[in-house]
Image: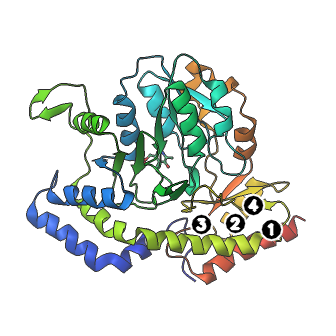
Amino acid sequence: MKNIQMVDLKSQYQKIKPAVDKAISEVLESAQFINGPEVKSFQTEMEAYLAVKHVIPCANGTDALQIALMALGLQPGDEVITTSFTFIATTEVIALLGLKPIFVDVDLDTFCIDATKIEAAVTDKTKAIVPVHLYGQAANMEEILLVAKKHNLVVVEDNAQAIGSNYHCVDGDQKTGTLGDIGCTSFFPSKNLGCYGDGGAIFTNNDELAAKMRMIVNHGQSKRYYHDLVGVNSRLDSIQAAVLRIKLRELDNYIAARRKVADYYDSFFAPFDGIKTPMRGTQSSHVFHQYTLTLEGIDRDALNQYLAEKGIPSMIYYPVPAHKQKMFSSFGSAETILPITDWLGERVLSLPIHTEMDEEQLSHICNGIAEFMKVNA
Ligand SMILES: *Cc1c(COP(=O)(O)O)cnc(C)c1O
């Protein structure tokens, strides 16, 4: 049996190696490493895939979030409503810009911000909402957009884990990350659409915001050496763009392969008391960036350890929720009461899921968990 990994980028690469190697060597021959034609082509292809007006490539997903927030012209002390149950980048950039993260609890079934609890957190300082489509499934965007409209708030979607997911709107499907004012994603290698280094992108249908963000990623200039805004240097390089063009063509196949793994897990765990498999909501399709169990009455950490001893990796995303991280101690956010976030934080366990898994590996993982359940019954 092939070694089991959380993600297997090596095997995935083997399948697209001829195309990738050719594309990379063409970039090397062209010597246009920055802002080359590959970046422009990737941008156009991504716009078509997402059916969005503007894609702005940048250096990574964290930058994407930071640039999005910079474009909103917020003032220090302004409040941004978000979730604590996320990768730290989402909330870190809020604090970095001198803004105040306001943590709202998550929904028990989707792991995403509980849209019904947002309005109670709105104050006269609230300027934006940053929902995170965690593990590959969207937050309740209809509800979030309604609250945002009512209170004149901007919505920035953190779509780093849900690229390719379809949100079922009344007038048809729309890609997640294109529903709010701005969407952000990461092309970190292990993401569903990952490059071979760092990369990220910002999406918007708003021409004005797009123009501003294109300036911000490039030192605040629209004309060379004339700097109108304080910006940053955040670029997607041509080699990464060349890799992404190839992988974007595979993205829907990759998502289908992940869903097959999820289907296998779903049916295996269905009879187990105490193992809750990820709910697939009716609002958006699940792209299974992670396959995350919620374990009730089962010693999660002992299972994690037991599997590790059998060479089966499993991960806790994330062991400490953002509001309890020391970096936010000045906000006193640790005192915020987020019962669902805390409850889930002690019970979630993510299993290996990627595009290259076979039945032998899946059955080995499932049997490992079944054995643990038997021993600890
Ligand atoms: C990966 C990720 C990011 C950050 O992306 P980087 O490219 O690593 O900077 C932000 N938010 C979420 C939810 C992520 O999963």
Q: In the structure shown, which secondary structural element does the residue marked by tag 2 occupy?
A: helix
Badge 1: how crowded within 10 Å, few (<14), some, or many (20+)? some
Report the Cα–Cα distance between label 4 and label 1.
7 Å
Q: In the structure shown, which secondary structural element does the residue marked by tag 1 occupy?
A: helix
The residue depicted at 24 percent of the width and 39 percent of the height is 214
Tell me residue 280's x, y (percent).
Answer: 66, 61
The residue depicted at 9 percent of the width and 63 percent of the height is 30
Given contact means CB atoms under 8 Å apart, are the residues at marks 4 and 2 in contact? yes
Which circle, 3 or 2, is nearer the viewer? 3
Badge 2: how crowded within 10 Å, few (<14), some, or many (20+)? some
Q: Can you identify the residue that label 1 sits on?
A: 372
Q: Can you identify the residue that label 4 sits on?
A: 303
Report the Cα–Cα distance between label 2 and label 1.
8 Å
Q: Is residue 271 visible?
A: yes
Quadrant of the frame with the N terminus: bottom right
Which tag, 4 or 3, sits closer to the chain's start? 4
Look at the numbered disc 2 and say if its residue's Cβ is closer than 8 Å to ligand 1: no
Numbered mark located on residue 352 in the image? 3
Q: Can you identify the residue that label 2 sits on?
A: 307
